[in-house]
């Protein structure tokens, strides 16, 4: 691993940009962004910069296409290196990122050129948006402890629901286990209080008990696309959990 930049952060403790020759079983030249917990938050293939490298991002973008390709707007919480926003650049996009250092690194090392990133807390920024404003709201925000609690409560999910256009969808990427994960079960059950239709898609893992990327989708409209259409994921059912509310 070759480190290109290591910066301290009040939100993520430490943010590192580095290059490797092998990533997720692929050989090549990859430039990555990671936080202090070692989880990779973004990556580009230097030999093919336009390709989406991270499997969960490929799945997320594909699910958005299956929901409704006609939606022309999205609000994204969590910038990373700008992959999601970059691939939605033909739409009206607004991104909320709490860490200005992350945005600066995305521009310097990952060639992010968008002028659509607002620095600040994603929940606070979203709450100031007009109702029925967005076809998609995407939550892909992490700190050193995981997804921030205040972005996984019933109060936040209601804020998001009010900002979705009719037929719009809320999408959440989170790390967790399919079985016996109290946090994941709680977030899923909380999401179901707000959205009439909730589906959960899981990316592969080496073992059933291993944490993996899970994509939770909530909408007031039923979307009946088949899981196999969203390449690289399976649809799963989670257990009942407790309801998460603002403290």
Image (cartoon, grey):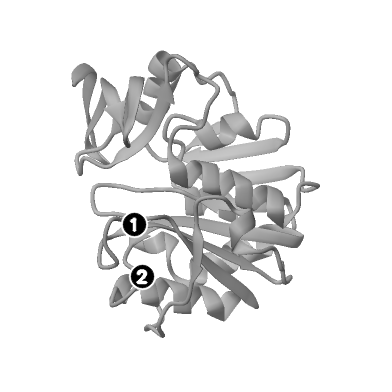
The location of residue 56, given as percent across then percent down, is 46, 47
Q: Nearer the viewer, residue 28 or 188?
A: 28
Q: Residue at x 58, y 56 (%)?
A: 127
Above or below 63: residue 223: below
- Residue 69: mark: none
Residue 12 figure quarter: top left
Above or below 192: residue 231: above
Would you name the residue on which mark 2 appears?
178
Q: Nearer the viewer, residue 171 or 150?
A: 171
The location of residue 112, given as percent across then percent down, is 51, 21
Q: Earlier in the sequence, mark 1 or mark 2?
A: 2
Label 2 neighbour load within 10 Å: few <14, some 14-19, many 20+: many
Q: Residue at x 72, y 72 (%)?
A: 222
Q: Residue at x 55, y 22 (%)?
A: 50
For the N terminus, the image quarter is top left
Label 1 neighbour load within 10 Å: few <14, some 14-19, many 20+: some
- Distance, label 1 to label 2, CA atoms, is 8 Å
Q: Secondary structure at mark 1?
A: strand
Q: Is residue 18 visible?
A: no
Residue 106 figure quarter: top left
Q: Is residue 205 left or right of residue 231?
A: left
- Give yes or no for contact between labels 1 and 2 (Cβ–Cβ under 8 Å): yes
Q: Residue at x 73, y 52 (%)?
A: 133
Q: Is residue 23 left or right of residue 216?
A: left
Would you name the residue on which mark 1 appears?
212
Above or below 215: residue 8: above
């Amino acid at each position: 691993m070759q480190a290109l930049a290591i910066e301290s952060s009040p939100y993520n403790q430490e943010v590192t940009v580095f290059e490797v020759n092998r990533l997720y079983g692929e050989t090549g030249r990859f430039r990555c962004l990671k936080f202090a917990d070692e989880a990779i938050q973004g990556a580009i293939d230097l030999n093919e910069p336009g390709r989406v490298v991270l499997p969960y991002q490929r799945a997320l973008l594909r699910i958005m296409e299956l929901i409704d390709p006609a939606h022309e707007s999205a609000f994204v919480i969590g910038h990373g290196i700008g992959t999601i926003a970059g691939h939605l650049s033909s739409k009206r996009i607004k991104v909320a990122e709490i860490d200005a250092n992350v945005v600066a690194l995305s521009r310097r090392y990952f060639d992010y050129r968008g002028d659509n990133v607002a620095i600040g807390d994603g929940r606070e920024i979203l709450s100031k948006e007009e109702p029925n404003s967005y076809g998609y709201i995407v939550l892909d925000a992490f700190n050193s402890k995981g997804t921030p609690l205040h972005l996984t409560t019933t109060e936040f999910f209601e804020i998001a629901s009010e900002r979705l256009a009719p037929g719009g969808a809320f999408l959440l990427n989170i790390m967790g286990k399919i079985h016996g994960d109290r946090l994941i079960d709680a977030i899923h059950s909380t999401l179901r209080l707000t959205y009439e239709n909730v589906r959960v898609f899981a990316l592969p893992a080496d073992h059933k008990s291993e944490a993996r990327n899970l994509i939770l989708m909530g909408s007031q409209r039923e979307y009946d696309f088949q899981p196999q259409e969203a390449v690289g994921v399976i649809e799963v059912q989670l257990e009942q959990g407790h309801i998460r509310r603002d403290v």
